[in-house]
Amino acid sequence: MQILVLAVIAAVVLYQLYATLGRRVGRQPEDAPATGARTVPAPAGPAEAIAAGPLEGVAALRARQPDFNTAHFLSGARSAYEMIVKAFAVGDRETLKPLLADDVMANFEAAIVAREAEGRSETVEMMSPPRVDLDTVAVVGDTARAVVRILAEVRARTTSTEGDAVDDRRTAELWTFERSLKSTNPNWILVHVAAAEA
């Protein structure tokens, strides 16, 4: 009888050990994704979808500026592009100066002076809203830098001693904007313009 009781106890103990040790606990090696597989976070809305390319840069910027909003930034970049292009065309230095870095303003000023010396005047209109995409974002020290790819269709009307001319053209450019993360001024300024592939 004692042997039977001991056998039953042993069976119960072994069952409990198996039930505990045999159970899969936590992540198992075979649960890991295959080599090379990437986990893509689900987009949180339009702003995150736009920022999908430079995701790491946006994350680094938000670590320093938590209220950074990609959609809001790109909307501002589009407005700045239209404002700067139109102000440059008519030689509106007062509008340009607070939007441009000093060296960019110097280049714009030289071009405006040359145009005025030739007796030419120009106006520009957007044929459709420019397309803006966030190309790269970086935080360098206390400076945030964002490169925006801009595709636009513009109509330039030029008046000179030779008469009037209309030029419809498509442009593809990379505009680099910067702002100091230590500054209370939330505005970004244009520090570089480069040609881009359409």
Image: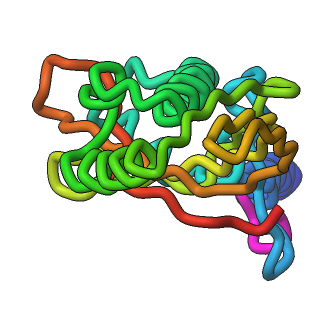
Q: Nearer the viewer, residue 98 or 35?
A: 98
The residue at 24%/52% (across/down) is 106
Tell me where residue 147 appears, x and y as whole percent: 51, 52
The answer to whether residue 1 is visible is: no
State the image quarter where residue 30 is shown: bottom right
The residue at 80%/24% (across/down) is 129
The reply, left or right, for residue 158 in relation to residue 170 is left
Range of residues picked out in magenta:
27-32
State the image quarter where residue 66 is shown: top left
Q: Nearer the viewer, residue 186 or 78?
A: 78
Q: Residue furthest front?
A: 161
The answer to whether residue 12 is visible is: yes
Quadrant in which the C terminus is drawn? bottom right
Residue 37 against residue 168 in the figure, above or below: below
Q: How many marks?
A: 0
The reply, left or right, for residue 137 in relation to residue 141 is right
Residue 189 against residue 107 in the figure, above or below: above
The residue at 52%/23% (across/down) is 83
Tell me where residue 11 appears, x and y as whole percent: 85, 54
Q: Nearer the viewer, residue 180 or 27?
A: 180
Tell me where residue 139 appears, x and y as whole percent: 31, 52
Tell me where residue 173 appears, x and y as whole percent: 65, 56
Residue 179 among magenta residues? no
Residue 35 against residue 54 in the figure, above or below: below
The residue at 76%/21% (across/down) is 45
Q: Residue furthest bottom?
A: 35
